[in-house]
Amino acid sequence: MQDFKKQALLVFLIGLIGFSSCKKQVEETIVYSNTIYEVTDVSIYSSNAEKTKQKSPELLLSIIYSDIFNQAIPSRTLLEIAELSTSNGDKTMFTEMIFSQFLTDPMASVPTNAQMRADVDAFVLDSYIRFYQRKPSEYEQIYLKNLITNNNLITVENVYSSFVLSNEYYFY
Amino acid sequence: MKRREFIKKATLTTAGAFVTPYILPSGRLFAPSGARKVNHVVFVLFGGGIRNQESVHQRYLLDQGRPAAGNIMNNMLTGAAPSSNVVYNPWAPILSNSLQSQGVLFKEMRYTTGPTGHYNGHTVAMTGNYTATGLNLNVNPENPTIFEYYRKHNSPSETALKAWWLSEGLGPYPSLNYSRHENYGAKYGANYLCPSHFITNTGFNNLNNASSYQPDDVTRIETMKTFFDANFDKTAGDLPGVINTRADKEKIKSMLLSTLQNISSLNLPIPSGASVNDLTSDLLNIATSWKVLETFKPELTVINTFNLDVCHSNFSGYLQNLHKADYGVGWLWDKIQSDPVLANDTIMICMPEHGRNATPNSLVDANGLRAYDHSSDQNSREIFSLIVGPPSVVKQNVSFGTTANPVGESVDIVPTIASILGFDGSIPSGLLPGRVLTEAFI
């Protein structure tokens, strides 16, 4: 939880920097920081056993968006994507397609492969928090770190895709 | 190698040689358990609500009080086109011989019970059971669909890549690729696609950079996913949707993304001289259906047309869209006959989901023509069906049924498809009230 408070504080400070530059930007940034604070403060899980409800297809799409872009999905985008999803029979296949599209977006908040490999421990921790809203167990941390470290072909996209396609990601 | 191990391996190898699948010319492994008539069925729910008067009776504008009769479905039916009072833009037929002449026309079939609503009609045609539910509830049907019968009872069982449902529009129709039946459901469902909401600018804008996974990516992703799943005690298998194998997912993704990202590659069912503006969502659905057929050679494909439902307020538009949908069906059959795998190994069945009323409503279109609803009167229960296929399997240029003696019901299509693909004998008794339309076959 300490890490999240630090993270929230950092976002809040970024918000303060914005405050001194542009009024409009200030308002947006403050809302953003509050949202982040609220989400991390409320939604963090101490274990995955707390996740009992399955996400609806729309909720899943909107959460994927916010996990990649660090912001709420615009309602128009959600409507468009939900309609495309409805137009396809295989929902997990569509999720994979839209996820691969998100990852190529210049606005996506995704580390590079070099950044991942520069600090695999931090990357694993961040990925668990980003997608599962919980910290990895010691075993999970070591296993995934070793997997990434021992296989130079594993990319950030591979890791993120695995999280998004895993069963735990479908639950909250 | 130790002696015991050697013997074990040798035994397995020998046994394997005996059970090695025999690859049939059609590309199938093993022969199916039941006798098949052909290996591919395309069922066109020629929907939107079509009156027999403007289709098989070829009365054109006679019921509007104008002395003009004729056949506006000149690809599907045999007969001369109207020569006067032409209120639609006629397209020259794509087929030199009508589908009627290449198969069997059940001229008077019946939709016997239940409301004549679009979703009801589709549900009845695809489940083989009449339904009393009159609401367009966006839930999967109660009774198993033809896709589930096929995937559960066909031997050998096939993946969802071999069963497709493509609908003209959304609404409740995405729910028809599998049922809520406890013994069937999503794991026996068909792939579903609605091209008019997917092959669009919205689709392009949201998926123009999307990609399929490469095989190496799949291996790495699956390794990590397996690890994650092992640490979580629930599965997301209940998510609504059909379940494809990993390999099939990548094939479908590749087809969808290449179509979206290279839209000009899609063959369009419009005649030379017509423009893209003439393309209706019915025709886009047919074009995409051909893409699916051409790419995956599915054994069971169900598609629908729907645009002529404008008949509620625009009779001229109804005639125009009926004429275009007929062209699309002819175009699709022409394409099927040009494919080395599908030609002479495909039976196509066309049937409206229901008819329309005998009496017009109060609306009049720009040409002064009265509009028709479909509110469960006797006329809206009168439909037709066309079954076309290879002359060695399907009777040619034969028709059955008269107004006084109708032959066949809409619930008969499901058992007929099951019979064509050879798995009708495996379906548990009591599930299907209809019968096989045996009259159609040699």
Image (tube, coloured by chain):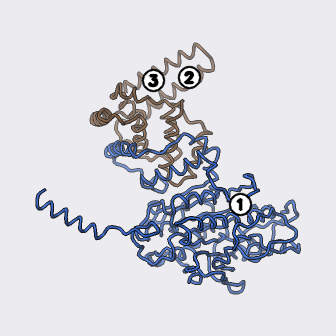
Residue in front for this viewpoint, B233 or A100: A100
Q: Position of residue A62 (x, y in %)?
A: 53, 40
Tell me the residue at 48%/59% (across/down). Answer: B161
Circle 3 Cα neighbour tier, 10 Å, few/some/many (<14 / 14–19 / ≥20): many
Seen at 40% across and 39% down, the residue is: A158
Residue linked to disc 3: A8
From this viewpoint, is residue A128 visible?
Answer: yes
Chain letter, disc 2 residue: A
Q: Position of residue B312 (x, y in %)?
A: 77, 63
**Residue type pointed to by label 1:** Asn
Q: Which residue is mark 2?
A: A29
Q: Could you tell me which secondary element the residue under label 3 belongs to?
A: helix
In the rendered image, which quarter contains the C terminus of chain A?
Answer: top left
- Identify the subunit bearing mark 3: A
Q: Are marks 2 and 1 in contact (CB under 8 Å)?
A: no
Q: Which residue is mark 1?
A: B307
Q: Are dots 2 and 1 on a single chain?
A: no
Dot 2 falls on a residue whose secondary structure is: helix
User: How far apart are the two marked residues, 3 and 2, measured between alpha carbons?
Assistant: 12 Å
The mark found on residue A141 in the picture is none
Of callouts 3 and 2, the N-terminal one: 3
Mark 2 belongs to which amino acid? Thr
Say which of marks 1 and 3 sits in front. 1
Whether discs 3 and 2 lie on one chain: the answer is yes
Please name whichever residue, B159 or B255, is drawn nearer the observer in this view of the structure.
B255
Is the N terminus of chain A in the top left, top right, bottom left or bottom right quadrant? top left
> With respect to residue B98, does A131 lie above or below?
above
Q: Relative to residue B129, is residue B407 drawn left or right?
A: right
Chain letter of disc 1 in the image: B
What chain is colored blue?
B
Colour of chain A in the image: brown
SS at badge 1: helix
